[in-house]
Image (tube, rainbow, N blue to C red):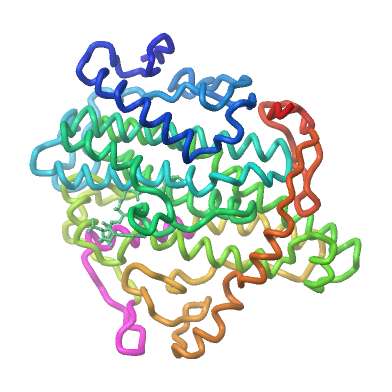
């Protein structure tokens, strides 16, 4: 169904046919806009930004590009088209028709997942609240704002589901989504990573590479859901999410390219010399990778989880790309994993259903490695003897079986003392962060880049790199 932009809330869910729901969402809308003004990139509210907006949900040309002031962005409710006669693709109800309503017995489980998903969206906007002030170029500034407005829209996607299918509880949860704030000591965001500050652009690129990729895998799992409106919301969100990971992969890649240029110019790999020349040495980039990859691994939950088993059994949340598996019921299937036990590592066989978080985490880690290999290929081509490596999924974990287990980045058990001693060299130290922050000086001349990052290969939507993507004057 086409998106109706004549409505106060653009939508393709026939909102005007349900006056009660429409009114409830129209009451939430000003609260969202107040939140955006307070917690979003509001210092740039008066400037036009070259943004894409969804105009349809099909694969051809869903996006329209144009100059928009962010508060005028048309946030709305867009579901991917329904798949006719879709049936449940996994779990105990495998093969039965998908649900258009939430069955009472699964209501709280669905609500918990939708709230958790919804909570991450405004959280990320809050984390990036002030980044615009230190943009390395107008191109990057525009990308930041594109990511921000789309995260705002993803919040709308979850709020629609809460309002439309969870009655009063859902409306209260929708209010709470605007009341919790990233890093707030009293009312923090639900998941750990979304309370980490993102105050420099290297962290932003790492966040969009690693943390948005968790978004990709969680959305893929929810896109399999037996609750069809949730599945359709997530399918459309996935199309928007791809750009965020592109920003991360190319962002880190451009940092690496610039560092390689400086290394070549100076004829050295000495970190101090590279830093002295205003670029970020590769070991520092590796430490940022270590930090953001491990923090994002926690977002998949525990290795062994009864929540995950229940969600799979009832068809609430599947595996990403469920269709690639042969056994969609997984009642008898088992899964082997390594667990820490009394200072040693033990291989254990558990029910596959309880290990669904680990299955998804492993798929995520493999996907993360693809970009790392691309960055490494650029380094190799430059003739530099250095390669990035993802740390082990056991390293620096705060959630699950490996939480608070002392390991090195390779995943070998080490003493607590050795861990405490070596950790500052494995993740960004205060000095690393201060150095990276010292580079964050705003560059806003069209086409110009800060000295620590190479230009992108091409502009947005086939425009030139020196196009004025944000009108600051
Ligand atoms: N921090 O059985 P467990 C995105 C909680 S990112 C704090 O281990 P379960 C985006 C868990 O909630 C994608 N708490 O795991 C990216 C549970 O609490 P309750 C976001 C954590 O339940 C960038 C308890 O521990 N979407 O879209 O199987 C920018 C035991 O849970 C953490 C989703 O996450 C943590 N890291 O799975 C913008 C999808 N991990 O309920 C956006 C929805 C676990 O007992 N969420 N806990 O109080 C889920 O599917 C699941 O809630 C989880 C955990 C995968 C997070």
Image point 38% across, 70% down: which residue?
A: 398
- Observer-nearest of 271 and 350: 271
Quadrant position of residue 333: bottom left
Residue 170, relative to residue 292: is it above or below? above
| Viewer-side residue, 35 vs 415 | 35
How far across and how far down the image is residue 336, in percent? Answer: 31, 71
Find residue 73 and report its horizontal and vertical position in percent: 51, 23
Which residue is painted at 48% across and 52% down in the image? 211
Where's the N terminus, which quadrant? top left
Question: Ligand 1 is in which quadrant of the figure?
Answer: bottom left
Quarter of the image for residue 354 reads: bottom left
| Res 5 → quadrant | top left
Image coordinates of residue 416 in percent, x first then y, are: 44, 88
- Residue at horizontal 63 percent and vertical 67 percent from the top: 286
Relative horizontal placement of residue 115, taking residue 435 as reference (left or right): left
Compared across the picture, whether 209 is left or right of 269 comes to: left
Task: Give the x, y percent position of residue 469.
Answer: 70, 29
Q: Give yes or no for residue 436 being in the magenta stretch.
A: no
**Magenta residues?**
339-365
């Amino acid at each position: 169904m086409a998106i109706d932009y004549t409505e106060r809330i653009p939508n393709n869910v026939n909102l005007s046919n349900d006056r009660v729901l429409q009114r409830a969402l129209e009451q939430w809308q000003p609260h969202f806009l107040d939140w955006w003004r307070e917690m979003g990139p509001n210092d740039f509210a008066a400037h036009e930004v070259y943004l894409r907006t969804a105009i349809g949900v099909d694969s051809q040309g869903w996006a329209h590009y144009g100059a928009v002031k962010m508060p005028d962005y048309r946030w709305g409710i867009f579901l991917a088209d329904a798949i006719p006669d879709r049936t449940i693709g996994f779990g105990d109800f495998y093969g039965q028709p998908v649900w258009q309503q939430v069955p009472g017995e699964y209501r709280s489980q669905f609500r918990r997942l939708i709230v958790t998903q919804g909570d991450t969206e405004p959280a990320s906007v809050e984390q990036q609240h002030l980044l615009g002030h230190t943009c390395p170029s107008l191109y990057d500034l525009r990308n930041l704002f594109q990511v921000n407005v789309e995260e705002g829209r993803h919040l709308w996607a979850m709020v629609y589901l809460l309002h439309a299918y969870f009655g009063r509880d859902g409306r209260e949860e929708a209010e709470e989504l605007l009341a919790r704030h990233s890093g707030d000591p009293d009312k923090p965001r639900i998941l750990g990573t979304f309370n980490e500050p993102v105050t420099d652009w290297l962290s932003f690129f790492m966040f969009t590479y690693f943390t948005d990729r968790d978004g990709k895998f969680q959305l893929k799992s929810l896109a399999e859901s037996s609750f069809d409106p949730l599945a359709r919301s997530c399918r459309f969100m996935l199309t928007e999410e791809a750009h965020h990971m592109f920003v991360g992969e190319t962002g880190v890649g451009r940092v690496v390219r610039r560092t390689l240029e400086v290394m070549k110019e100076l004829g050295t790999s000495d970190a101090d010399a590279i830093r002295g020349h205003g670029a970020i040495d590769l070991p520092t980039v590796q430490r940022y990778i270590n930090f953001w990859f491990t923090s994002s691994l926690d977002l998949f939950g525990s290795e062994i989880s009864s929540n995950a088993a229940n969600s799979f059994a009832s068809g609430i949340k599947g595996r990403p790309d469920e269709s690639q598996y042969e056994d969609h019921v997984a009642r008898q299937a088992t899964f082997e994993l390594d667990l820490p036990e009394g200072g040693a590592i033990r291989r254990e066989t558990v029910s596959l259903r309880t290990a669904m978080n680990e299955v998804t985490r492993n798929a995520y880690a493999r996907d993360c490695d693809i970009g790392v290999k691309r960055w490494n290929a650029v380094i190799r081509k430059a003739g530099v003897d250095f390669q990035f490596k993802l740390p082990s999924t056991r390293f620096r974990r705060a959630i699950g079986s490996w939480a608070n287990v002392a390991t090195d980045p390779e995943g070998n058990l080490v003493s607590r003392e050795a861990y405490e001693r070596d950790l500052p060299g494995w993740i960004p130290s205060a000095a690393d962060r201060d150095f990276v922050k010292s580079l964050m000086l705003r560059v806003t001349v069209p086409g110009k880049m800060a000295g620590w990052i190479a230009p992108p290969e091409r502009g947005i939507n086939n425009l030139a790199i020196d196009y004025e993507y944000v009108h600051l004057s």
